[in-house]
């Protein structure tokens, strides 16, 4: 059994992606779901406390009753058994935005990542926005260096490009050169791609205010909200 994967293009919390977050809560069993937020990506510039507060306020506004921030702020905390234990009963693990490179350094290969995978295989929702979505691909683009680094590989041979409608599309030419055989997922802000169940068999759906653009080599396909597709 596998759970639900939610990849959002940015502008999380504060009502800007209500539709997407309500879908995630529904997949997790409703407002009583155990929601755990990892503000790791925002710790790169000490923004994790603010990101955590924003998450708590937003999920409370949706009616969620069991929401907590898990202090995974670096690789040491991502490997701390006491911190990892806080994810053991999570129905939703949510990763907000920030630095994709910092997030990858902290999470990839960590005990926290192993627990996230365990929860996902047990049926939980894994959700990320912006950098938090990028980490689920095999490849994570580092805009500051123009290089790609390894992600959690939940989606093999995939590179996720958030904020596509605002600036992410500027990354595409470089990514098509460096990753010519990879699938590139361009996700607009206030938009998400979601899939539940077997990643190889179940269709993805698009939700939110924008579109999903999928690149397979030189071929690009654009999907509006409400559309379904297979990767």
Image (cartoon, rainbow, N blue to C red):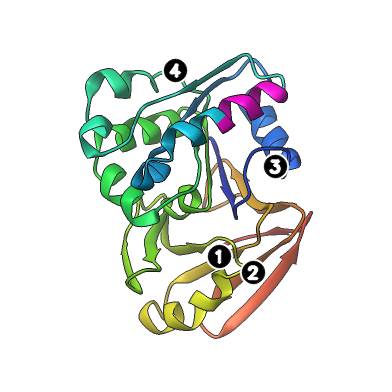
- Residue at (38%, 36%) from the top-left corner? 117
Q: Which mark is residue 185?
A: 1
Say above or below: 172 vs 77. Answer: below
Q: Residue 197, position in %: x, y?
A: 56, 40
Disc on the earlier residue, 4 or 3: 3
Based on the picture, tell me whether residue 58 belongs to the magenta stretch: yes
Q: Circle 4 sits on which residue?
A: 89
> What is the crowding at mark 1: few (fewer than 14 residues within 10 Å), some, or many (at least 20)?
many
For label 4, the SS is loop
Asked if disc 2 and disc 1 are in contact, CB closer than 8 Å, the reply is yes
Q: Quick check: 229 left or right of 201?
A: right
Q: CA distance from mark 4 to mark 3?
A: 22 Å
> What is the crowding at mark 4: few (fewer than 14 residues within 10 Å), some, or many (at least 20)?
some
Q: Where's the C terminus, which quadrant? A: bottom right
Based on the picture, tell me whether residue 74 belongs to the magenta stretch: no
Residue 63 position by quadrant: top right
Look at the image and give the residue range highlighted in magenta.
Answer: 54-62
Q: CA distance from mark 1 to mark 4?
A: 30 Å
Say above or below: 151 vs 164. Answer: above
Q: Circle 2 sits on which residue?
A: 213
For label 2, the SS is strand
Q: CA distance from mark 3 to mark 2?
A: 17 Å
């Amino acid at each position: 059994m596998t759970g639900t994967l939610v990849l959002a293009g940015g502008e999380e919390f504060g009502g800007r992606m209500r539709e997407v977050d309500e879908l995630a809560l529904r997949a997790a069993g409703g407002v009583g779901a155990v929601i755990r937020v990892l503000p790791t990506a925002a710790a790169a510039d000490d923004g994790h406390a603010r990101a955590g507060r924003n998450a708590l306020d937003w999920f409370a506004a949706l009616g969620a009753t069991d929401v907590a921030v898990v202090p995974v702020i670096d690789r040491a905390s991502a490997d701390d058994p006491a911190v990892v234990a806080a994810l053991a009963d999570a129905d939703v693990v949510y990763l907000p935005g920030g630095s994709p490179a910092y997030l990858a350094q902290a999470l990839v290969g960590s005990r926290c990542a192993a627990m996230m995978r365990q929860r996902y295989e047990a049926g939980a929702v894994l959700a990320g926005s912006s950098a938090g979505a990028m980490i689920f691909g095999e490849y994570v683009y580092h805009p500051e260096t123009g290089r790609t680094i390894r992600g959690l590989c939940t989606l093999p041979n995939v590179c996720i490009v958030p904020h596509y409608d605002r600036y992410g599309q500027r990354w595409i030419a470089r990514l098509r050169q460096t990753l010519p055989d990879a699938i590139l997922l361009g996700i607009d802000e206030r938009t998400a791609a979601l899939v539940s169940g077997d990643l190889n068999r179940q269709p993805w759906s698009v939700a939110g205010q924008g579109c999903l653009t999928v690149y397979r080599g030189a071929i690009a396909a654009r999907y509006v909200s409400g559309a379904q597709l297979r990767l």
